[in-house]
Image (cartoon, rainbow, N blue to C red):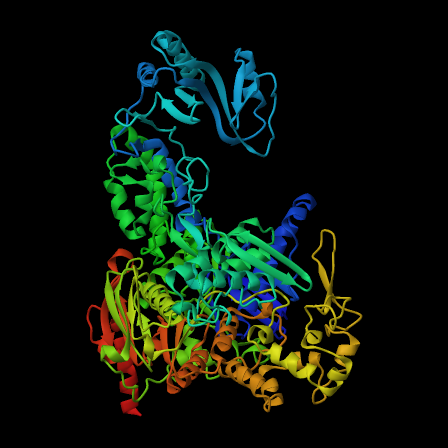
Amino acid sequence: MEPKLLSIRGARMHNLKNIDVDLPRNKLVVFTGLSGSGKSTLAFDTLYAEGQRRYVESLSTYARQFLGQMDKPDVDSLEGLSPAVSIEQKTTSKNPRSTVGTVTEIYDHLRLLYARCGRPHCPECGSEIQAQSIEDMVNTLMAEPEGKKVILMAPLVTARKGRHEQILARIRKEGFVRVRVDGEIYHADEITALEKNKRHTIEVVIDRLVIKPSIRRRLSDSVSTAVKVTDGFLLANYPDDNSEQLFSEHAACHSCGISMPQISTQLLSFNNPQGACPECSGLGVNQFFDASLVVPDQSKSIIDGAIAPWGWRSESTYTGQLLSAVAKHYGFRLSTPFSKLAPEHQKVILFGTGDEEIHFYYQKGRRVMTAEKSFEGVIPQLDRRFHETQSPMIRDELSKFMNEQTCSKCKGARLKPEALAVKVGPHSIYELTRFSIGKLLNELPLLPFNSRERKIGEPILKEIVDRLSFLEDVGLSYLSLERRAGTLSGGEAQRIRLASQIGSRLAGVLYILDEPSIGLHQRDNQKLINTLIELRDLGNSVIVVEHDTDTILAADHILDMGPGAGIHGGEVVYGGDVKGLLADDTSVTGAYLSNRKRIEVPGKRRKVHKKKSNNLVVKNATTNNLKGITANFPIGVMTCVTGVSGSGKSSLVIETLYGLAKKGLSLRQNKFETEAGEISGLQHIDKIVDIDQSPIGRTPRSNPATYAGVFTPIRELFSRLPESRARGYKPGRFSFNIKGGRCEACDGEGVNKIAMHFLPDIYVVCETCQGKRYNTETLDILYRDKNIHEVLNMTVAEALEFFQNIPPIKNRLQTLYDVGLSYIKLGQSSVTLSGGEAQRVKLGRELSGRPSGKTLYILDEPTTGLHPADIQHLLNVLGRLVEHGNSVVIIEHNLDVVKTADWIIDVGPEGGDGGGEIVACGTPEDISSVQDSHTGQFLLPVLEQNVTENSLN
């Protein structure tokens, strides 16, 4: 009999305090509570980890050695556990080759549709191309100039891996004497097999001829032989200029003389050499070293470090003397600001002297060298180093100075012209992938097919439409299939995987999701909730870690964790239905849901200067789906950019506002313009900071102190102590990442890994340092009776009090404290931080710098992973920044943040092609009165409720 409950007994992972929980099976269960209260620990590190471990344990010993082992969670027992599937925020692929189409496998089905039903067209003239007869091929070859040499070949294998022994044996058996393999001609008896793991191209040499009138009959026989051997293909090679021409009985353009390769799924794949654009290798973009990144601050001179990758090499170095020689040769000074150098001198520094040689004098000690040589240039040297180096670290460092531009050959389509010339109806495969999912669903039924094509295409189209419909059901109708997977938010990536799971129609599975509502507008919330309910109704248990009000209210069962966060959490505050949660006095979540607690609407909003001369103004913005819009961003206030998912918020704020402002500030210009748009009013800011959703480092060695920049001043403080000076200890002595001060027995990790064959690796506390990471000599150094290990073991609150007289440390700790992270330990491994905690550590680091009063802060959905109580902490910090004269621009859906903003820019009205316009601008009250604004419709009841309750009070 199937158990009705999922029973957890004695859960102690991370901050869980030996809790016992009973959860109903085959229900929608929501885990909620303060950030860091233990929700993710219970859901992922306990339930999912044990479900996966048991599955792996059920496999054979042979299979387990390939899968790796999972640690057993610290829990006494788990009963009623189903096979577990985790859909987390961290699963987004950063591979530039991954797109929405490839991740969902819809692109694979489109390739199949085009390979079976597509009609080839000429890449040059666009006309539908016809098959060539043997007579047509002979006439084309005879039209070549008399006396021209030609080698006729039959292509058998094109860029395919394998030894190809049977094909080579067939060539010898049929009496052919010569064969061309990978561009080289061999005697057929010389090669019997090829290297297995390399791609090979094999062509049989049929005949070698010289074009003249008397050769026509022999030519016709040779062409017939080649076509017979290859089932319709002939390759003509002209040795004089090494050019080649492909003929085909299947497809060729008579007017242009262009033959099409055989249409296959490989030809339509940008991840296959047969189909990928040769210029960009199927990426759609080319990377290049951007002069604006190489010289980010043109107000600096070369001596002051204007060339960012080089800094300034003193004149005693090789590079310094080389630059001095260049400056002397062209008559300019290295101390002149880069922006004031003549354009031709800037070009020489960045791109070199070409063939022009300069007199170079180099002195090192007593050695003197002179030479006449050209100067390579900064950018060519960086490009050479990038392509020659074998070090991933150097490549990563150099990539900071690179940018991307659309491939000039394929225009971002990623495919060869031959692949783009295959069409179904009026559309190439790339044109279909550019449509939004919603538009594509409308277009597919309109594709014109004849009766044969319709019979072949119907089952393929059904599969495509089903998958697209699942994506639309989870609120992703605005995405296009060609969008890079790496640009998706965590919530979008989760919803794509969720749609795939719905399509799989599995039952009896435990699904665990981590805040799938991230990035979703309130209008689309019900679509997501309906999908979760459908997953439950299939016979699955669905557990969602979530703060979203609508999702919590739709749950069958709620588990509220708390009462606090970190060491103050790890307990079950409430378990039961929604009605009981709303009435529970001990639950902070229940208090916010029942409106006993709430984030208040400001009694008086900050004054907004509406004159364009007092604002940052973005004009003619056309990035992605933006339709040439103009947006005013007020200075000195908190601005919220709202709109439905895919409406163009990130395109406006991140790619346009941030991109243009950053470049304009680096050039010290008040106005800056590119093809993407124009920005003015940069004189009102002197710095711009973008706090995006990219994760912080999650290696076991990384910790909040290191990431927030606190650890460096702490190490410097310890190195300045009298005892450290006496012993000659430098700051590096107090790092557990380098030799010197760390414990070498455990390499500064505090634990040693014991490999257990066919069992999970065991981590035991290092016997030498007892888990303290440092050697005895380093631990002897004390500051106020505390050594470096004891300092790292402090919570943020304890450290703030301990270092209250050390401003460089105190200021950084204060920001961590203010964003609600008072309970985490300085040296706590970042892998134990929840998603909300990791986000706030990043936010704390960005905000810990001393505000200039003219800084523009840009935040992309900073409420990710935050409970309403934590959002209040965040708003307090942002409010303090604005009070200092700074400006804050936030992309946000959360109405608690939106209602407290001073100014709102609502983008829409819909997502994808239906968005990209400014729906409304104004205060929250202004937006709530706009009928066309989806945000306004949801904002109005929130503001009315606040007014009503204030009047009652």
Which part of the image, by quadrant, shows the N terminus? bottom right
The quarter holding residue 809 reads bottom right
Going 58% across and 59% down the picture, which residue do you hit? 361
Going 52% across and 61% down the picture, which residue do you hit? 325
Which part of the image, by quadrant, shows the C terminus? bottom left
**Residue 98 appears left or right of 172:** left
Vertical order, 560 against 214 (above or below): below
| Residue 247 location (% of width, % of height) | 37, 22
Vertical order, 505 against 891 (above or below): above
**Residue 374 appears left or right of 803:** left
Vertical order, 394 against 833 (above or below): above
* Observer-nearest of 687 and 416: 687
| Residue 479 location (% of width, % of height) | 34, 55
| Residue 500 location (% of width, % of height) | 43, 50
Residue 467 visible in the displayed image: yes
Going 39% across and 48% down the picture, which residue do you hit? 284
Residue 497 visible in the displayed image: no
**Residue 677 appears left or right of 859:** left
* Observer-nearest of 878 and 451: 878
The quarter holding residue 606 reads bottom left
**Residue 718 appears left or right of 327:** right
